[in-house]
Image: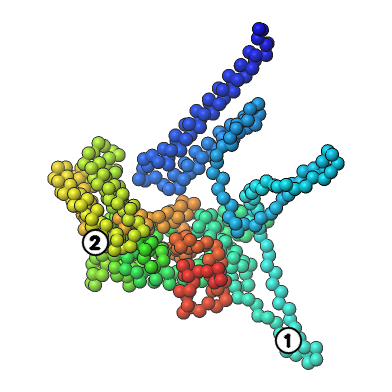
Amino acid sequence: MTVPDKLPDDIAELKAIIRVQQDQNARLEALVASFKKALFGTKSEKVDPAQYELELEDIETAIAQVEAEIDADERTAPVRSPKPRQTNRGSLPKHLERVEVVIEPELSCACGAKRHVIGEDVSERLDIIPAQFRVIVTRRPKYACRRCEEGIVQAPAPAHIIAGGMPTETTLAHVLVSKFADHLPLYRQAQIYSRQGIDLDRSTLAAWVGKSAFELAPVYDALLADLKRSTKLFMDETPAPVLAPGRKKTKTGYFWALARDDRPWRGDDPPGVAFTYAPGRSGQHADMILKGFSGTLQVDGYAGYNRLLKRPAQDVTLAYCWAHARRKLYDVTQSSTAPIAQDGLAHIQALYRIEKDLRGLTADQRHAARQGRSKPIIDTLELWLAQSRARVSAKSPTGEALKYIDKYWDGLILFLSDGRVEIDNNTVERTIRPIALNRKNALFAGHDAGAQNWAVIASLIETCKLNGIEPHGYLSDTLIAIAQGHKQADVKELLPWNYTKDV
């Protein structure tokens, strides 16, 4: 039996295909390993959430590129893959408009008869139309009586936020959401509009934002007042670079976030957050913002909050954050071999495992479970803390971390006696992240007043997010209600958690 002359060529071609597939598999395995490491591996305590998301996006994009290459090879291969690759395509919401396209085959059969329908295959694909601009033309005819030629009547002009101006309230809402939720500075928005032939100067958009912030300020004030009526809140602060007039430099102000989230213990009050801009980080700013509040305030270890404990009424109790205590120990383990810090981390991790089980229980149930499960760990941790401090120098990195935990011990263990208290301050830190991202995109605020406008609008948008409310619809309808003369006495009706589509 003779071997066909073509066989060596076929073998060489198959070997080349195998090498290509092996290379693709190796690249995929490396990318999947990187993806798993990014998703599940140890992360630095200081990793920027936005940077972390960017890392995942780039890895996923690279994986998709290799998969597309494999698909292209399979389409040209003599043998198709018997099973399509499983991919996460997502789902398309029912409320989206459906545009049906029917693709008909040749209906005439070879026998001369006409084919009839026996079934169909249906597929759905997501289509995006770039933002569409339209002009609302409002006509107000004038009418007069032919008999007496008097009594001319005309419908009154509808009220708008920008009286006699160009934008509708929906346009204002779009600008606000783009800037404060999607982190698009006004000059970038102006560039986007320009591509559609709409020439709007950045200063014009800024004027719209300022006017909107002024009109929304009473709603913000009502939000802040509602939060301060609670007896359990979170507070945190984050730097806010602000341009110093005349100096061509920035100064550092601060956004102070006051947050409420009672959902983990089935509280009745809706979640919310109110940001306040202050020119500094002094504890007097926290005291001023919290005027009228009494109860438990959950904070990090910043010493400025101690000013609240000096109130004559002594009406504020500070609960501290185990995540910050953990971070002190974690930093020690990253710079050196630290068995004492490792032991501390193990104790704190045990507390977090218990808290995961308790999320969603009532405050009383959480209190009872913590007394039974968490208190023995705290008792052990207290003994460990005393023994460990005696073994290390107070000025060593481990000694400094232990000193921090000892200093705030009473506030750290407050969660044992109050089921409403969380184990950490992460609730309010999550609300600050969008502020930090917007700060990076915008670089700095242009003025102290502009920073407070930032705080007003960001408070309403982030509170919408906490309550599962679409911010554009909320802001649009709220601005319309304000323009139409919504009563100041009923401003609570305009708070995000009271919003319905019929506002």
Can residue 426 be seen? yes
Of residue 108 and residue 282, the one placed in the foreground of this image is 108
- Position of the N terminus by quadrant: top right
Q: Is mark 2 on a helix, strand or loop?
A: loop
Across and down, in percent, residue 355 comes to 31, 53
Q: Is residue 107 above or below residue 172?
A: above
What residue is pinned by disc 2?
Answer: 417
Residue at the spot 44% in from the left edge and 56% down from the top edge: 435
Of residue 1 and residue 345, the one placed in the foreground of this image is 1
Residue at the spot 70% in from the left edge and 82% down from the top edge: 154
* Amino acid type at mark 1: Ile
* Amino acid type at mark 2: Ser
> What is the C-alpha distance between the residues marked 1 and 2?
73 Å
Q: Is residue 107 left or right of residue 485?
A: right
Q: Is residue 29 above or below residue 178?
A: above
Across and down, in percent, residue 145 comes to 77, 88
What residue is pinned by disc 1?
Answer: 152
Q: Is mark 1 on a helix, strand or loop?
A: loop
Of residue 340 and residue 18, the one placed in the foreground of this image is 18
Across and down, in percent, residue 401 comes to 23, 47
Residue at the spot 24% in from the left edge and 72% down from the top edge: 313
